[in-house]
Image (tube, grey):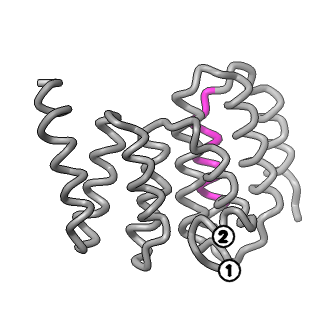
């Protein structure tokens, strides 16, 4: 029941994540908390703590969990991580945001945008994803693939301009 989830399961998940060092448990708990969506402020604290984890899987799952929770308040942090800004680097506790964190930030943004009812939020996310898609020069295609997938799930109310820009980009021989 909703009462059992709120009063028994969610508190147990918070207890586990605070006391357990197993990365599989940490990732499972974060995804569970994100999907349940109860106590989002507390869940955000868990994600923020784990975004700095030394285990890459835990760190990238924290970034994705914001998207699963559909947390519009996380958009600035996800954009900072995606774009590898100083603020994004501070979030992950490093001199650069790891490529996989950036990739999972793109997926998180796509999930948040898909769930949003705001055209402004959807368009803002779409613009950032498209600009990164056309400017990313990393040898690994992960970020570009994440940008395209995330653009595809945004469900823009007026996708014509984006489709045109994507078409031009794909037709560019360079």
The prevailing secondary structure element of the residues shown in magenta is helix
Task: Determine whether the residue tagged by mark 1 lies in a helix, strand or loop.
Answer: loop
Q: Nearer the viewer, residue 64 or 7?
A: 7
Q: Nearer the viewer, residue 102 or 18?
A: 18
Q: What stretch is highlighted in magenta?
A: 144-155
Residue 109 picture quarter = top right
Question: Mark 2 falls on what kind of element?
Answer: helix
Res. 122 image quadrant: top right
Q: Mark 2 points at which residue?
A: 89
The residue pinned by badge 1 equals 95
Q: Is residue 4 left or right of residue 36?
A: left
Which residue: 61% across, 57% down?
A: 145
Q: Is mark 1 in CB contact (under 8 Å) with mark 2?
A: yes
Q: Distance between the residues labelled 1 and 2?
A: 6 Å
Q: Local crowd at mark 1 within 10 Å, few (<14), some, or many (≥20)?
A: few
Residue 149 on the magenta span: yes
| Side (left or right) of 48 relative to 88 | left
Q: How crowded is mark 2: few (under 14 residues within 10 Å), some or many (20 or more)?
A: some
In the figure, 158 relative to 23: above or below?
above
Residue 1 at what x, y percent from top left? 11, 24
The x, y position of residue 41, in whole percent, is 43, 41
Check if residue 47 falls in the magenta segment.
no
The picture places residue 84, in percent across and down from the top left corner, at 71, 66
Q: In this view, does 128 lie to the left or right of 15?
A: right
């Amino acid at each position: 029941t909703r009462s059992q989830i709120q009063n028994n399961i969610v508190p147990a998940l918070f207890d586990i994540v605070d006391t357990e060092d197993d990365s599989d448990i940490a990732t499972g708990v974060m995804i569970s908390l994100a999907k349940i969506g109860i106590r989002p402020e507390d869940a955000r604290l868990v994600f923020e703590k784990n975004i700095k984890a030394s285990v890459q899987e835990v760190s990238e799952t924290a970034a994705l969990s914001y998207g699963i929770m559909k947390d519009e308040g996380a958009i600035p942090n996800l954009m900072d991580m995606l774009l590898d800004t100083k603020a994004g680097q501070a979030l992950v506790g490093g001199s650069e945001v790891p490529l996989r964190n950036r990739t999972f930030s793109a997926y998180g943004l796509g999930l948040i945008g898909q769930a949003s009812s705001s055209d402004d939020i959807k368009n803002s996310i779409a613009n950032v994803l498209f600009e990164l898609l056309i400017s990313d020069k990393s040898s690994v295609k992960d970020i570009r693939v994440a940008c395209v997938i995330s653009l595809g799930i945004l469900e823009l109310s007026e996708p014509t301009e984006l489709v045109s820009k994507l078409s031009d980009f794909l037709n560019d021989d360079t």
